[in-house]
Amino acid sequence: MALRIVFMGTPDFAVPTLLEIVGQGHDVAAVYTQPPRPAGRGMAEQPSPVQEAARRFNIPVVMPKTLRIEKAEALFASHEADVAVVAAFGLILPKPILDAPRHGCLNLHASLLPRWRGAAPIQRAIMAGDIETGVTIMRMEEGLDTGPACMMERTPISDEDTAGSLHDRLARLGADLMVRALGALERGGLTSAPQPEDGVTYADKIDKQEAEIDWRRPASEVHRHINGLSPFPGAWCAMPLGDDKERVKVLKARPAQGAGAAGTILSLEPLVVACSDGAVELIELQRAGKRPTDAAAFIRGVRLSAGSVL
């Protein structure tokens, strides 16, 4: 028998889970998502990716600014959901909301809890040099990602992974894992266990001030910093492309052979820059107001030379 579900999510990461739930024939009574936000050059208000997906299936959409008022609590309870499914929703759920569905609220989190609780688990896993990450389905409680874990799925992190590529892989893994969890819930077989107290880390929200590349760090850290902040906000450095230095985003890098003074361009083909220990190859870059491009195309369009210092 299909479950009656309230789905709560906002960004692209949540969309595959919503699509899988609908595809499995569950009854989605309502979709909760963040209100439209200004975006793009014209700063026109854009609906969230989850709102756009819900429209395709004619699912009622609710866009609360808060859930901490009686009116919001009453509306949520009126859906008479068996379970709420939450994936990167963006609002804290107060206890009356958590308690309203018959089976509570299941959250899809993009890490292997208790590692990387919080807002930016994908980026922090790469930046910290983790060799694997994954997704966790947990039963929600009032703490920040502290609820008992039901199911996990793991995936390795490679040197080629960026936050963008890992995001997309985890979104697909999470969608599959959530529908498996819902299937177990239907059968009365979804079990959970408290998260261990050891190994708790917090994935603080990414601050744009973190984005500047510090070539004085070891190459392994610079590489992870660049890939962990791609595509957003994008790690950047100042490059001597004309009379003045220009801020350029570096969207992908990998470890490379070479040594020199930190920030020195060691070669152009490939584009290799020295760090305090070792070097990195810059693979994808983006000038302000331009599209991302591979390093070879970037070099053809600028005045750079080996020996230049970033």
Image (cartoon, rainbow, N blue to C red):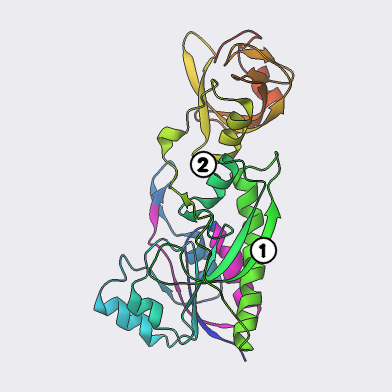
The residue carrying mark 1 is 153
Q: Quadrant of residue 21?
A: bottom right
The residue carrying mark 2 is 232
Q: Residue furthest front?
A: 198
Mark 2 and mark 1: span between their CA atoms? 25 Å
The residue positioned 55% from the left and 21% from the top of the image is 215
Check disc 2 and report its element: helix, strand or loop: loop
Residue 16 on the magenta span = yes
Where's the N terminus, which quadrant? bottom right
The residue positioned 52% from the left and 36% from the top of the image is 234
Where's the C terminus, which quadrant? top right
Q: Is residue 223 left or right of residue 209?
A: right
Residue 180 is at least partly visible in this image: yes
**Amino acid type for the residue under numbered disc 1:** Glu
Q: Which residues are magenta?
A: 13-37
The location of residue 80, given as percent across then percent down, is 43, 88
Q: Is residue 41 left or right of residue 148?
A: left
